[in-house]
């Protein structure tokens, strides 16, 4: 009888050991994936901050043009301020989709305001030809492209993490360890493209082919 009891105890100890090893491995794997998402979120924040840092110089350069539409500059300034009012952690990816949607909406309004500014600039040849403005325009275009890239990479990292916490055996431990789904950026039609930065209002449409 004692041998049977020892045998059963040995099996339980073995199973407990396997469970502990599995739990540790799962936890470490999820930590790595969570850290990867947070690191990519920080990179998204970096490129958005780079755009925000460009705006004061852009506004100052444009405001020097004679009779430039002040309402356009006011819109950009207010949109930039609205972004700062949305409270998100710069180092930890949000788990609340509503919070991320508010952040995304504020950034989208700023993108729209910048796009309208660049359309208006086309009416000011002297400003458009300015070396300072051309440099800022190129930096803005590059930043908008980088934003699209980093948002895509963030969604990829978040998708990998969210899938990992739902797979066996992680699904049995994730909630107990405090791992929750990460929110995604939601794509909108045309969101993968940066705001247009060049227009030619003087160009005539090509004649229709017969």
Image (cartoon, rainbow, N blue to C red):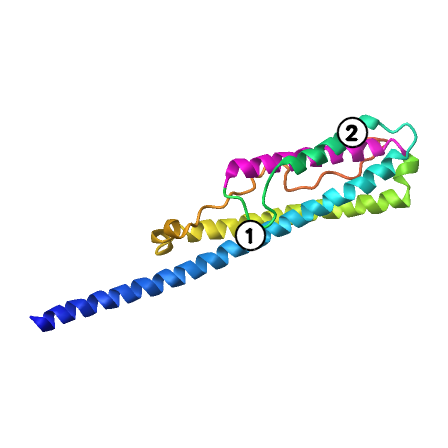
Q: Please state if 33 lies on the left or on the right of 83 as rendered.
A: left
Residue 179: give x, y in percent of width and height. Answer: 43, 50
Indicate the quadrant where residue 82 lies: top right
Spatial CA distance of label 1 from label 2 is 34 Å
Residue designated by label 1 = 38
Indicate the quadrant where residue 193 lies: top right
Asked if residue 61 is among those painted magenta in the image, a careful observer would answer no
149 relative to 120, above or below: below
Residue at image position (81%, 43%) is 137
> At numbered mark 2, what does the secondary structure look like: helix, strand or loop?
helix
> At numbered mark 1, what does the secondary structure look like: helix, strand or loop?
helix
Residue designated by label 2 = 74
Q: In the rendered structure, which segment of residues is drawn in magenta?
A: 96-124
**The C terminus lies in which quarter of the figure?**
top right
Mark with earlier residue (1, 2): 1
Is residue 207 visible in the rendered image? The answer is no
């Amino acid at each position: 009888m004692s041998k049977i009891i020892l045998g059963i105890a040995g099996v339980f100890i073995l199973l407990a050991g396997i469970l502990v090893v599995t739990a540790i491995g799962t936890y470490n794997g999820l930590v790595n994936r969570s850290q990867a998402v947070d690191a990519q979120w920080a990179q998204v924040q970096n490129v958005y901050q780079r755009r925000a840092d460009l705006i004061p110089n852009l506004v100052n350069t444009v405001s020097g043009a004679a009779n430039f539409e002040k309402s356009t500059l006011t819109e950009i300034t207010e949109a930039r301020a609205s972004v700062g009012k949305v409270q998100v952690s710069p180092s930890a990816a949000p788990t609340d989709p509503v919070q991320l949607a508010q952040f995304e909406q504020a950034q989208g309004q700023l993108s729209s305001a910048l796009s309208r500014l660049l359309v208006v600039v086309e009416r000011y040849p002297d400003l458009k030809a300015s070396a300072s403005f051309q440099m800022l325009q190129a930096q803005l275009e590059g930043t908008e492209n980088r934003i699209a890239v980093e948002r895509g990479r963030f969604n990829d990292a978040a998708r990998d993490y969210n899938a990992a916490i739902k797979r066996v055996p992680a699904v049995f431990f994730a909630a107990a360890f405090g791992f929750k789904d990460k929110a995604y950026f939601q794509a909108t039609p045309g969101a993968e493209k940066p705001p247009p930065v060049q227009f030619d209002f003087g160009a005539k449409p090509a004649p229709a082919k017969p």
